[in-house]
Image (spheres, helix red, strand yellow):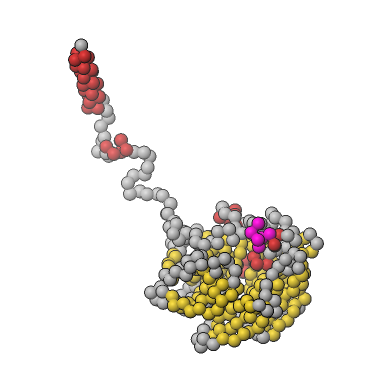
Amino acid sequence: MKGNYTIIFSAVIILILLGILAYLNFFMEKPTDESSPNDVFSNLEFDALGENTDSPVVDNNTGLPDISGNQPRVRLRQLTTRNTVGYAEVVRSTTTPPVVLIGEAGVGHIYEINLEQGTETRIGYTTIPDARSMFFSNDGTTFAVITSERGGPGQLRLGVLSDEGSAALTVVADNVTTATILDGVLLYSKQHNNGIDVVERDLARGSEKTLFTVPFREAIVVFGETVTGPHVAYPKSSQHLEGFVYSYTGTTRTRTPLNGFGLTAHLAGDSIVGSWRNGSELTSYYYEGSNRLDLASPVIPEKCTGITDVIVCGYDSETTLTSRSTDAWHQGTARFEDDVWLITQGQLLQLIDIEAESGRAVDLISPQIGYTTNDLYFKNKVDQTLWWYDLSEDIEATSNQ
């Protein structure tokens, strides 16, 4: 009996397969000359082969969108996806446009960003472990890097980039808190038991001299735009300690009339932007020459930069700053969603809503204005990425007022 069932089952299967074959031959619509079997059986509603209408893919290794060709004008752009420990706009020659150099956190690799072509090129292949801060010369050939395992004062090394991408590194000093390179001179602040020495090193000769000494060890030094200054220094901020701002021009120290509890300050072009505790509130000012003007809204000075007659800041208008805000922000327990604002006559004028324009919130730090004064660069404290904003329209509007 089992053999009969097997024969019957096999015959049914054969009849089903013959029925399917007959349907395909006599009833299925055959493709015409204008179509192909692939069009009939494989058309998943994608465009025809060769008619790719997908958006250009951004190289995730660079984070740079395609800005070449006839693209719509963009005023705000994220330049990197890398953690950036230092950057600078540099001019290699009078016949080439400025480029941006960045140093990568932790490894010290150096990259060049061409804003006109929208490209990023690695130009420094030497690995520098624990790179914490990096500073570049005006022409981009020389750089200084501070390395530190724990983020405090560290070892300062000086490097020269070769055409092959290697860097010859020279140890300059230990216990260095910050540095800058201005007009062929390396300036750095070196911490010791009795205070901080600010040292001037001539890069061409290799000679050094102490420019001035800050008479307290726990201090913030902010370098100006020229070797001779003015530079400023003040004790590290605490809402429980009164601070004073000192200005240094050459070897001359001047105590400014700026003081207060929880004091912080930063240079913005020719001005000093500062904040201090006023009861439970935070009060901000900017100071130029002998003139001081209080701001209508408080700001965190480290979020500000400027040139002559122009001061711009990162400012979160949705958050009320209090006397505790600065300490909390420095400690990493507070975060802001900043926009770019212009300080004019003591008032804050919004230039761009960063989150509305980019879809990302930015806690703005390390702002710099480029050589042409049209470019504002800044970092996002959250992920240490570098951003760019076109200031040209704002500068023009300010000059016409």
Where residue 246 appears, x then y in whole percent? Answer: 71, 77
Task: Name the image quarter holding residue 376.
Answer: bottom right
Decide: is 88 above or below 59: below
On screen, residue 277 versus residue 45, left or right, reads right
Decide: is 222 above or below 329: below
Q: Which residues are magenta?
A: 328-333
Q: Main secondary structure of the magenta part?
A: helix
Residue drawn 19% across the image and 15% down it: 3
Residue drawn 34% across the image and 44% down it: 48
Residue 232 in view in this figure: no
Q: Which quadrant holds the C terminus?
A: bottom right
**Of 318 and 342, the residue lying toward us:** 318
Residue drawn 72% across the image and 66% down it: 238
Task: Name the image quarter holding residue 285.
Answer: bottom right
Where residue 36 appears, x then y in whole percent? Answer: 27, 39
**Of 199 and 366, the residue lying toward us:** 199
Tell whether position 319 is magenta.
Answer: no
